[in-house]
Amino acid sequence: MYKRSIIFLMMWLPALIAGAQKNVLTGFPKGYTPEEVGRLIAYRMVYSKHALHAGKWIGYPETFFWTGALHYAQLTKDDMLLGFLRNRFEPLFTTEKELLPIKNHVDLNMFGSLPLTLWQLTKDQRYLSLGLPYAQTQWQVPADAKPEEKAWADKGYSWQTRLWIDDMYMITIVQTQAYKATGDVVYINRAAKEMALYLDELQRPNGLFYHAPDVPFYWGRGNGWMAAGVTELLRYLPATNPHHARIMKGYRAMMASLKSYQQPNGMWNQLVDEPDCWAETSGSAMFAYAFITGVKKGWLDAAVYGPAARKAWMALVGYVNAQGAVSEVCVGTNKKNDKQYYYDRPRATGDYHGQAPYLWCVRALLEQ
């Protein structure tokens, strides 16, 4: 009997340990729960002003902040918040139609992910009709496309391909949402093929990514877009997809590198590999989202990454003020081959680049 008990315990011990490590992502103290932090940030979206791309169209930071708030409303069954967020969108069908992004750039087509999310929550056909063309036109080559854009399309990639790492959230998010909305695998297959290309072309031997091939610095939010994008894709990508193994390998390589660069306080720095650089919240929240999701989905070793994910979340909450605004957010940043440029970037409070990733963490923590 004793021997059988030992064998039984040995068989189940790994599962029990993994479960215990996953539990580190629950039981947060008052003020740190995803419900509290999520409510504070999500309701801030209700009264926030539009953040326009080029002063003309709804930009990607607002789009993702809005979508994050919608997921919070769904997961907490907050119908009042959902109503507020739908009311905010309604003028885009009428008096604010001119704010709808045009469909000619990777940073604009991503907008389709917002109405596609709204369609999944409400089944209002207007959202589906508005959102799908943003996903479709990423692969429909316009008549005035440049030769290099046509060349990408001829290989089966988006004509909007440009090999910037933030594309791997912009493209992934609208294609995965189109897949979720329609069930048509063409959308998820597009995203997977594109992701495999970017991993093959841009991932460095240490698992991270330069801001650009000609800018050899590991900028936090730039890497964050990739970390969040590959995580978002893996949430929905069937294991039978021919690119699944390659994408999972790239994801795990990146997560291992990020784990090694996590600071003792739980954060990551503006330049990930520079210990004297300042702690930056938007990139840190994107990395935390990738860790939390990986642990809960079983992609990452829970014993290693569970405590790291909790440590990151606990640190991140300290940057949220009583009005739900996240501080220490690097402002919008173009590439520059100058390390000091990244050290000197302005830091904002309430910038939508930071608000959205916090809500991604909230979603990952709340999901069962």
Image (tube, rainbow, N blue to C red):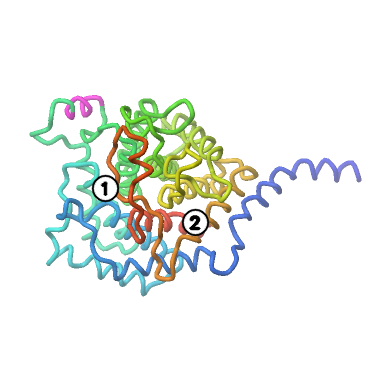
| Amino acid on which the number 2 mark rests in the picture | Leu
Name, please, the residue furthest toward the left: 144
Label 2: few (<14), some or many (≥20) within 10 Å? many
Q: Earlier in the sequence, mark 1 or mark 2?
A: 1
Q: Three-letter amino acid code at disc 1? A: Met
- Secondary structure beneath dot 2 equals helix
Q: Of tags 1 and 2, which is closer to the observer?
A: 2
Task: Tell me, yes or no, whether the two marked residues, 1 and 2, touch with CB atoms within 8 Å.
Answer: no
Residue 207 on image: x %, y %: 47, 31
At which x and y percent is residue 135? 24, 45
Residue placed at 80% from the left, 45% from the top? 9
In the rendered structure, find residue 316 and report the number of the disc placed on it: 2
Q: Nearer the viewer, residue 79 or 7?
A: 79
In percent of the image, x 36 and y 62: which residue is there?
Answer: 70
Quadrant where the N terminus lies?
top right
Q: Which residue is mark 1?
A: 110
Residue 160 vs residue 225, the one in the foreground: 225
Q: Which residues are magenta?
A: 149-155
The image shows residue 82 at horizontal and vertical percentages of 34, 69
Q: Is residue 309 left or right of residue 202?
A: right
Between the residue at mark 1 and the residue at mark 2, the CA separation in whole angstroms equals 26 Å
- The answer to which image quadrant residue 87 occupies is bottom left
